Every structure is written in C-alpha cells, then in structure tokens.
Amino acid sequence: MKVYLDITAFECNHNKVTGLDVSQNTVLKTLLCHNNLITSLDINQNTALKKLVCYGNNLNNLAIDDIYCALYAKQPANYARISTVFNSTSPNHAVVMAINKQNAIDKGWKM
C-alpha cells in the first residue's frame, strides 16, 4: 500500500496489509499500522513522525532494529511514542525490548 497524500495521520490497522510505503509523506506525524502482515517499514523520510504503533506485524528483529535506527531525534518537550510490541505480556516482549531500543530512547522516544 502506497500513501501519496501529504497527510499528518494515517491509520490502517487490522487490515492484513503486507507492505506500506509512507516515504512520500514527510509531514506524517502519526502512523498506526498495527496488527497487519507488514514485514518491513521504511520511515527514513518521515521527519515529523511523533507516534508510531506497529506491533502485531511480521516484523523480525532486524526490521524492528531498522525502525529504531531510522527514528528522528525529538526534544523531550516534543513527546514522541513508539510501540513495537503490544504490552509486557506479549510473547516477544523481552526480545523486542532488548533489540537496540536504546536508539529510540536516546533520540527522545518513549517506548
């Protein structure tokens, strides 16, 4: 699925989406794409992003690490939140939290 419009928020959760291209949406602030079949997510161009919810997809450890590394730094006053796992009882919680989450934290993102 490719999103072409200059939008600030996009939601496509619970839709069996296998791929999502938001690379043209540089003003995107909120991306809710949880509970789909996405295997990778390129957010390198999404400099305005402040909220990303992408848990419940087919993102492997490398894909999650790529997402953390691609996050743009936010000032503490510019509250930014990322959710790559549903909650602490999720089966993959420990692994996901161990995957270089410090990249996101160091950039001002809340987990």
Image: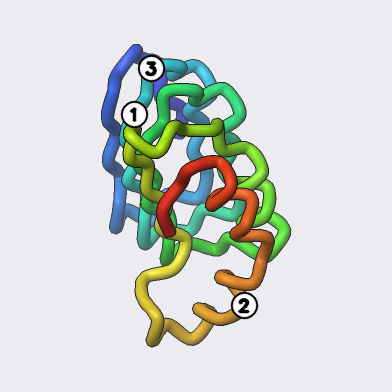
Label 1 with label 3: CB-CB less than 8 Å: yes
Residue that numbered label 3 is attached to: 27
Residue that numbered label 2 is attached to: 95
The residue under the point 52% across, 53% down is 38
Q: Amino acid at mark 1?
A: Lys
State how far apart marks 1 and 2 are (Cα): 27 Å
- Residue 75, given in percent of the width and then of the height, sits at 44, 32
Q: Is residue 107 above or below residue 13?
A: above
The residue under the point 62% across, 77% down is 95
Q: Nearer the viewer, residue 30 or 41?
A: 30
User: Dot 3 surroundings within 10 Å: few (below 14), some, or many (20 or more)?
Assistant: some
Judge from the rendering whether residue 33 lies leftward or rightward of residue 108; answer left or right. left
Q: Is residue 96 above or below residue 45?
A: below
Q: Residue furthest top?
A: 6
Upstream in the sequence, badge 2 or badge 3? 3
Q: Is residue 98 above or below residue 111?
A: below
- Residue 29, given in percent of the width and then of the height, sits at 34, 29
Model colouring = rainbow
User: Dot 2 surroundings within 10 Å: few (below 14), some, or many (20 or more)?
Assistant: few
State how far apart marks 2 and 3 are (Cα): 31 Å
Q: Nearer the viewer, residue 17 or 89?
A: 89
Q: Nearer the viewer, residue 67 or 40?
A: 67
Upstream in the sequence, badge 1 or badge 2? 1
- Residue 80, given in percent of the width and then of the height, sits at 37, 41
Q: Residue furthest right?
A: 62
Residue that numbered label 1 is attached to: 29
Secondary structure type for disc 2: helix
Q: Is residue 5 above or below residue 106?
A: above
Q: Residue furthest front?
A: 76
Q: Amino acid at mark 2?
A: Val
